[in-house]
Amino acid sequence: MGNERSYAGRSPSTISGGAEAGGCEPERSLTNRIVCVDMDGVLVDSESGLQRVPASVRARYEARHYDDGKDHFDDIPGIFALMDPMPDAIESYRELAGLFDTYILSTAPWANPSAGSDKLIWVRRHLDDVAQRPPRNRRSSLVHERLSS
């Protein structure tokens, strides 16, 4: 995921800055570090779900039907359950979850009552083994809250 750094062969509980970081950084514990990962567009390929929705259903959620001029595909009931993971997202998340307390950040559209449960089902389907592994990863969570109005 972006600027990756391999921790292979080193303990996940302590990573030393060592020579590769200039040798000035003291050993630090990663067990209490938190990493938040966005769900939509980072873990989940939103377009993959949209491609599985029949054209007749997609047409009802196109911008031409709304005053704001935007497509409302996120409001299609069940769409989030149809989505695939982004390439390498599951493996990358598992690696992060092995090193940090991980949280998945997402929100659900207000007009789609199934979105929240569909997203939780998606996480359980693709990442349940990571989210259920104690002790650190017991805190792997789907953070689901409306942040703006």
Image (cartoon, helix red, strand yellow):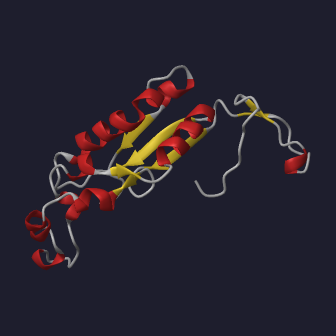
Q: Residue at x 71, y 44 (%)?
A: 6
Quarter placement of the C terminus: bottom left
Percent of width and height locating residue 14: 76, 31
Q: Quadrant of residue 46?
A: bottom left
Percent of width and height locating residue 95: 58, 38
Q: Residue at x 45, y 29 (%)?
A: 131
Q: Nearer the viewer, residue 97 or 126?
A: 126
Percent of width and height locating residue 47: 31, 62
Q: Is residue 121 above or below residue 4?
A: above
Q: Residue at x 53, y 37 (%)?
A: 94
Relative side of 93 to 71, left or right: right
Percent of width and height locating residue 65: 10, 75
Q: Nearer the viewer, residue 128 or 66?
A: 128
Give the total number of marks visible in the rendering.
0
Q: Quadrant of residue 70?
A: bottom left
Q: Quadrant of residue 148?
A: bottom left
